[in-house]
Every structure is written in structure tokens, then in C-alpha cells.
């Protein structure tokens, strides 16, 4: 009880500070209250109270000017860490420490350099804390009436001493994991609705426990539902545990173990859960809304009943993105995934998105499930995610849900629903999964996939997932294969014609290969023999102007699409191979590759299909002098330039 008493007195002190704000330079804790949080810096906790007060004053004004939310805690941590370091390093002299007095230059530098020691290697936290303190010093220096030591101001404005570290982007859920999440969410949502419906129906069957019984579940539910009794009344009036019926013990325990010492608290919480949703099961609606809309967790949980407008076939929501400070109006139509997106240009910049599932149905169910809880918390108007709970003190509590609370986190919801996911169990991965699906549907068009933020943000935070990496790799491989196939289809080398079976090569086979009758007859008669190959038309050379005789034969015939290699060309091919082998020993590899690389590759391909017997027979013709290859004089002179 002492622990809770200290917490209560500390909170009361913070609330008192809020009611009586401390003027700049005054004495007392500086407090910032925001949505769901309360942070404070008390200069009296440090020896360097003057320094702490100066930094805290800048922090309070900065939060008020910028509207920082939970990120404001970074400044609190930075001030606390820095002031504790000043107390330890300066000792008794810390009382005179100030942003105005000289001497903090070395202290600030030493503090920044020691920050990485308290964090894992590669953590971004040290740079974040150092940057927060530096920003407060710069902000104070920018004020004409708040002097700051010149050396300290220059240090704060100068380059940082530590790096940002490394960050690892969360990967999206696998397709099977996401499907399991959505199915589990629908199952959880239906179970919640059924339980609440049964609970209120059971409550209508009861009566006041004073008339009925303090051990009757319907009577206890009736009393709580009609505000005739409180959980504390149940604690006081329920008979001793040994008088409880087994059914009441089982009801109080639920899926957990019955603990006699906590039986009354278990009973009250079990009764409350029959009437109001509790924190953990609201994760299901967040999953469904993120899946249906594709928006971030803070957006789908940050709109109230007044920001919901049902359309004839859909729903319009007002979504607030805290980090970017964007207020957007989005309409989600009850259409199939194949429907195309439409943008409605109105004064509200209304954008119509076609989700894969109906967001309107999810919102209707959420409104129905939380209606009674929201009626108990009229002060909560900025979210539909309102739950009810019984505290350890038997006090009922209704308020905006805390998704990371103990016993109600997203990971614990996964465990209860039996959903297995690999990696970090963070709801932000659902947003990335939807983004990946949108990128796939839009065929990788970043502008279409990044419809609710900048393309730079999409590339930096969403395009790094495994799925998109695989798809990108497949796209690149497909493109490469396309151009490779296209390059193969464009014949830049000779056509090698071999006789079919044991028959000799004839004119008809050349004509079947694509030559005209005149070209086939000229090749068979040797009229178009260019040395290492035959040519279908020497006056249409790709290396010479149209209409002029080819000027590079026979040196470039193996790189020409007009060349036709016949079995009779094998001896000349072997002679040309010997010539290229000599060049390979004389020229540097880059030079040979540039001048003769393609000819060498095509020549090796043409000779690779020849049998050893064919090679040996061709060598005999060469040795006997029956086969010669006339090469121009320039073929024996090579220049590296």
C-alpha cells in the first residue's frame, strides 16, 4: 500500500503543479500533460537545480509551441540524464551550474561521449538524447533575453560527437500470418459481441442483490448494470468464500486459476467483463480497421463518434496522424478489391479509397461494442476505443484503452488467440503488410502505393520489406530475361547449317533455313564464299554503307548476321582459331576482348558442336595444304590505342 500511496501523492503533486503553473525561473516542478500521459521535471531533485530549471522551462515552452505528444518524454529523459551527470561530475560546484556561466562546455561534451556506454552498440538513443538537450540550449540562445555562454552555444550548434547508430526496419507479416491475424480478429470481435449480449440479457433477468442474493450472478449483473451497487459493495456484502457455490467460483475464475485470496476481485472483474469490453480484446478491432483502411494504428484508434459519418454504401472517417500533424477525411466504400480508386476533390480534400474489406462494418461493430463504456466515460471523445476495468482498489475505471498495458498488450492478445508470428510482435507490421499488398496491386507504382504519405517515406520505411524485395528481384530478373531473349532473337552472329542425319547438305535445306533459291544456289556453288563463311548478301553488310561491298570480310564474318557456316568451312574456321589464339598471347585481355571478344565467343560456339572426327579430318586438309585462309595484312598488325 505504501507504493500506491507514494504514486498517488506524486500524481497529486503533479496535478497541483498543473493547477498552479510555475513561472519561468521559478521554483517547483515543470509539468506537461497531454493525451494519456503526464511528464514532469522537478529541479529540486538535482544539485544543479538552476541548470535543470533553465532546461525545463525551455522544454515546457517547446512542447506548448510544437504540440509534441509522447516524443516529449525524450526531452525529460535527456534533462534528467544530463543533470545527474552534472551533479556527479561537479559535486558541490553543481549548485552554481548554469547555461549562462562558463564551464559547461567540457561537461556537455563529456556527457555526450559517455552516453553510448549505457546502450547497446548501434543504438540511436544516445544521439537522440544528446540532440534533445542541444535543441533546448539552442532554443534558449535564440531568445534575446535569455543569455547562454558563447562557447556552450557554439558547441550546441556544432556537429555532434556521436553517430545516429543503426536502425532496422520492421518486416511486414507474412501473407499466412496476416490472414491468420484477420481471421483471429473477426473471431475475437464476434466472441466479444456475443459475450456482452449474453451478459446484458442475463442482467435483465436479475434484481437488486438485497432482494435477491449476493451470490447470484444475474442479481450482481443487474446491480452493476443499473448502477445500484458498486464493486466495493460486492466486496463488502458477498459472503465468505467457503459459502460460494462451485458455479460462482468457476464464473469468477473464468479461464484462469481460482485464487481464494483474490476471489472477490476476480468476481468483480468477471462481472465487469460481462457488461463492458476490456483492453485486450479491443486489439481485434484495431487489426480489422488497419486491414480495411490501410492506415496507421494511431489513426484508426484516434477518431471519436463525431468523426464518423456513415454513407449509403460506406463510411467517412476523420483521421489524425499525430507525427505528421495531418487531419484527413477519408471515405471507404463498401466495394470489392477490384474497384479502382477515385478521388473526390472537395473543400475537405476528400479522398475515396476502395479497401479490400468493409471498414463500415468494423466501425459499426466497434460502436456497438463500446457504446456503454463510452457512455460511462463522457470525457473521452477522441477515440472509440474505450474499455472498462476494475482496479485493485475495487474502483471501476472507464477510459481510453492503453494498448501496451500489462495483461492487455498486442503480444498477449496473439497468445490468447493462438496466432503465431515470426519476428517482432508489433502492430506496425500490419500497416506494412497492407502497404505491400497495395504496392502489388498497383504493380509497383510508388506514387499509387504511397497515397497517404510521401514517396520518400514509402521508399525508406515500406519498400524494404522481404516481399517487395523478392518482387523487385523477380521484376529485375524478368526484365533481364526479356532483354536477354531479345538479344538472342537478334542474330548478331553466323547461322551454322549442318546436314540432317547422314545425308549431304543440299540446296533445299538452305532454302528451308530461310534463304531464297538464288542465294542457296550461289552458296552451294561457292559464289558467296567469304573465307571463313558464306554470305547471303555481301552488299548488305552491317559494317559498310548499304549498297557497298563488305569491307571487313573475313575478319568480322563471325560477328555478322549475314554469314552462313557450312561443313566445308570447318578447315578455315580452325585456321582462324589459330590466328585468334596468337592474338590472345600478344594483346592485353581488355584489348583482345574489345577487338575480338565477340568473334572468339561465336567461333567457340561454332566449333563446340563438331565431333573429334570432324576436327581431325579438317586438320588433315590443313596439313596437306588443301585449305588456306587469306587474311588482309592488317590482321597481323594490332594497335592498343
Image (cartoon, rainbow, N blue to C red):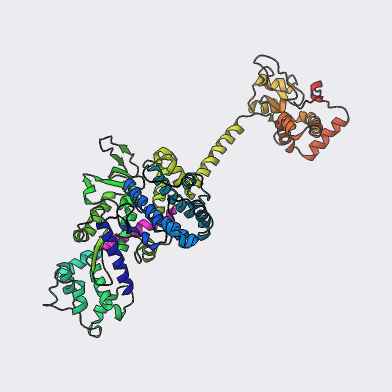
Q: Quadrant of the C terminus?
A: top right
Residue at figure coordinates x 29%, y 61% from the top left: 14
Give the quarter of the image for residue 174: bottom left
Give the quarter of the image for residue 17: bottom left
The overriding secondary structure of the stretch rendered in magenta is helix
Residue 511, x across and y down, in percent = 65, 25
Q: In this view, does 77 lie above or below 473?
A: below
Question: Foreground residue, 378 or 221?
Answer: 378
Residue at figure coordinates x 79%, y 26% from the top left: 638
Residue 483, x across and y down, in percent = 57, 34
Looking at the image, how many numbered discs can be counted on the residues? 0
The residue lying furthest to the left in this view is 211
Q: In this view, does 103 lie to the left or right of 406?
A: right
Q: Is residue 161 left or right of residue 414?
A: right
Residue 179 covered by magenta stretch: yes
Question: Foreground residue, 233 or 225?
Answer: 233
The residue lying furthest to the top in this view is 547
Q: In this view, does 260 lie above or below 172?
A: below
Question: Foreground residue, 501 or 153?
Answer: 153
- The magenta-colored residue range is 170-192
Residue 618, x across and y down, in percent = 82, 33
Amino acid at each position: 500500500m505504501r507504493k500506491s500511496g507514494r504514486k498517488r501523492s506524486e500524481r497529486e503533486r503533479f496535478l497541483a503543479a498543473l493547477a498552479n503553473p510555475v513561472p519561468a525561473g521559478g521554483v517547483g516542478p515543470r509539468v506537461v500533460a497531454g493525451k494519456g500521459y503526464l511528464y514532469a521535471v522537478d529541479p529540486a531533485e538535482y544539485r544543479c537545480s538552476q541548470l535543470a530549471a533553465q532546461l525545463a522551462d525551455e522544454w515546457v515552452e517547446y512542447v506548448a509551441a510544437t504540440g509534441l505528444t509522447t516524443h516529449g518524454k525524450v526531452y525529460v529523459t535527456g534533462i534528467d540524464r544530463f543533470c545527474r551527470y552534472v551533479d556527479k561530475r561537479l559535486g558541490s560546484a553543481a549548485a552554481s551550474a548554469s547555461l549562462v556561466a562558463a564551464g559547461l562546455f567540457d561537461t556537455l561534451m563529456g556527457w555526450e561521449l559517455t552516453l553510448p556506454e549505457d546502450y547497446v552498440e548501434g543504438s540511436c538513443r544516445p544521439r537522440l538524447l544528446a540532440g534533445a538537450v542541444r535543441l533546448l540550449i539552442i532554443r534558449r540562445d535564440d531568445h534575446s533575453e535569455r543569455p547562454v555562454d558563447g562557447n556552450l552555444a557554439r558547441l550546441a550548434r556544432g556537429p555532434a560527437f556521436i553517430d545516429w547508430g543503426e536502425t532496422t526496419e520492421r518486416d511486414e507479416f507474412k501473407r499466412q500470418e496476416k490472414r491468420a491475424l484477420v481471421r483471429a480478429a473477426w473471431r475475437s470481435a464476434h466472441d466479444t459481441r456475443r459475450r456482452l449480449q449474453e451478459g446484458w440479457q442475463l442482467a435483465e433477468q436479475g434484481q437488486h442483490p438485497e432482494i435477491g442474493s449476493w451470490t447470484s450472478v444475474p442479481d450482481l449483473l443487474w446491480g452493476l448494470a443499473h448502477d445500484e451497487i458498486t464493486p466495493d459493495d460486492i466486496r463488502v456484502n458477498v459472503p465468505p468464500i467457503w459459502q460460494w457455490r462451485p458455479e460462482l467460483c468457476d464464473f469468477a475464475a473464468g479461464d484462469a486459476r481460482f485464487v481464494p485470496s483474490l476471489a472477490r476481485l476476480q468476481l468483480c472483474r468477471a462481472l465487469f467483463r460481462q457488461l463492458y469490453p476490456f483492453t485486450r480484446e479491443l486489439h481485434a478491432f484495431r487489426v480489422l480497421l488497419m486491414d480495411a483502411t490501410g492506415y496507421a494504428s494511431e489513426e484508426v484508434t484516434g477518431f471519436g463518434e463525431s468523426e464518423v459519418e456513415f454513407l449509403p454504401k460506406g463510411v467517412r472517417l476523420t483521421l489524425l496522424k499525430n507525427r505528421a500533424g495531418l487531419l484527413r477525411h477519408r471515405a471507404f466504400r463498401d466495394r470489392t478489391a477490384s474497384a479502382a480508386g477515385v478521388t473526390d476533390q472537395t473543400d475537405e480534400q476528400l479522398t475515396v479509397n476502395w479497401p479490400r474489406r468493409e471498414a463500415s462494418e468494423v466501425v459499426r461493430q466497434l460502436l456497438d461494442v463500446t457504446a456503454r463504456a463510452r457512455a460511462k466515460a463522457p470525457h473521452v471523445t477522441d477515440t472509440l476505443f474505450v474499455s472498462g476495468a476494475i482496479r485493485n482498489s475495487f474502483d471501476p475505471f472507464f477510459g481510453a484503452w492503453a494498448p501496451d498495458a500489462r495483461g492487455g498488450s498486442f503480444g498477449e492478445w496473439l497468445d490468447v488467440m493462438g496466432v503465431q508470428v515470426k519476428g517482432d510482435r508489433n502492430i506496425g507490421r500490419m500497416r506494412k503488410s497492407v502497404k505491400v499488398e497495395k504496392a502489388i496491386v498497383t504493380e509497383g507504382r510508388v506514387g499509387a502505393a504511397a497515397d497517404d504519405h510521401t514517396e520518400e517515406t514509402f521508399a525508406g520505411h515500406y519498400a524494404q520489406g522481404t516481399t517487395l524485395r523478392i518482387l523487385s528481384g523477380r521484376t529485375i530478373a524478368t526484365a533481364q530475361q526479356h532483354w536477354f531473349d531479345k538479344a538472342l532473337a537478334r542474330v548478331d552472329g553466323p547461322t551454322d547449317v549442318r546436314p540432317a542425319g547422314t545425308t549431304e547438305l543440299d540446296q533445299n535445306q538452305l532454302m528451308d533455313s530461310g534463304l531464297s533459291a538464288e542465294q542457296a544456289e550461289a552458296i552451294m556453288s561457292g559464289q558467296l564464299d567469304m573465307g571463313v563463311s558464306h554470305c547471303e548478301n555481301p552488299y548488305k553488310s552491317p559494317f559498310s554503307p548499304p549498297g557497298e561491298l563488305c569491307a571487313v570480310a573475313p575478319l568480322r564474318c563471325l560477328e555478322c548476321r549475314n554469314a552462313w557456316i557450312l561443313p566445308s568451312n570447318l578447315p578455315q574456321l580452325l585456321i582462324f582459331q589459330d590466328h585468334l589464339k596468337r592474338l590472345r598471347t600478344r594483346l592485353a585481355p581488355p584489348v583482345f576482348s574489345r577487338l575480338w571478344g565477340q568473334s572468339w565467343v561465336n567461333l567457340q560456339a561454332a566449333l563446340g558442336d563438331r565431333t573429334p572426327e570432324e576436327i581431325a579430318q579438317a586438320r588433315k586438309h590443313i596439313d596437306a595444304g588443301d585449305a588456306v585462309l587469306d587474311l588482309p595484312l592488317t590482321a597481323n598488325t594490332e594497335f592498343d590505342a
